[in-house]
Image (cartoon, helix red, strand yellow):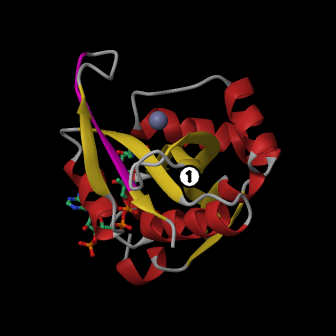
Amino acid sequence: METSLKKQYKIREASEEDLLTVMNINRICLPENYSYVFFETVLRSYPKSFLVAEVNERIAGYIMCRVERALSRFHRFKLCRVGHVISIAVLPEYRRAGIATALMEKAMEALKNVYGCSEIFLEVRVSNTPAINLYEKLGFIKIERIKNYYLDGEDAYLMARELI
Ligand code: ACO
Ligand code: ZN
């Protein structure tokens, strides 16, 4: 697709009608898949940080997050609300147009301003250079390497940043 066309995307909150499409994008893009009920529960619990990107009325990508209470990764002994990016993906034909960046930025805004999170974190395969680059560009740092995190045995990086 021509770059100028895929740049015309719109980010909006997901609705339950979007969930089958979101599940389909998740299956196309990632080996980590979830049940309908899981997607639905995340959407009902944290609707402001479950977003889709639309290009010409077609959903091109999504991000889903939840909020957890955890020890800060940046300030010792501090308990805080942290946003957890469960999953983000953009269909192959819409990549490299800034869509994932826009999804992450809007989700981070909601996690901070609506859900009161002071940090955000996620896990990513150590081999997933595109995603690691995306997160580093957004200011995330690698906090630790989690051995054997994925079902096929691959390690994950836990990456995080403060929301300030
Ligand atoms: N190679 C190297 N760097 C890349 C690549 C790539 N193929 N794709 C993105 N990046 C980096 C670049 O730094 C890029 O900036 P630039 O284009 O100015 O160089 C930056 O990320 C931002 O790129 P976007 O256009 O915003 O990202 P895109 O919309 O293409 O989506 C994503 C990136 C989500 C990683 C996409 O490639 C994808 O869906 N991959 C498969 C699913 C996946 O891996 N999801 C993340 C799993 S981890 C998790 O969900 C918590
Ligand atoms: Zn996770």
The percent coordinates of residue 16 (x first, y second) are: 81, 44
Q: Amino acid at mark 1?
A: Ile
Q: Name the one closer to the observer, 69 or 79.
A: 79
- The residue sitting at the bottom extreme is 4
Query: What residue sits 48% from the left and 32% below the top?
Result: 27
Q: Which quadrant of the figure contains the N terminus? A: bottom left
Q: Main secondary structure of the magenta part?
A: strand
Left or right position of 71 against 132? right
SS at circle 1: strand
The percent coordinates of residue 99 (x first, y second) are: 46, 68
Magenta stretch encompasses residue 154: yes
Start and end of the magenta stretch? 153-160
Look at mark 1 in the image and give the residue it sits on: 63
State the image quarter where residue 125 is shown. top left
Q: Residues within 10 Å of mark 1 (few under 14, many from 20)?
A: many
Left or right position of 55 against 113? left
Left or right position of 44 against 137? right
Q: Name the one closer to the observer, 10 or 128.
A: 128
Q: Name the one closer to the observer, 17 or 108.
A: 108
The percent coordinates of residue 84 (x first, y second) are: 53, 45
State the image quarter where residue 28 is shown. top left
Query: What residue sits 58% from the left and 25% below the top?
Result: 34
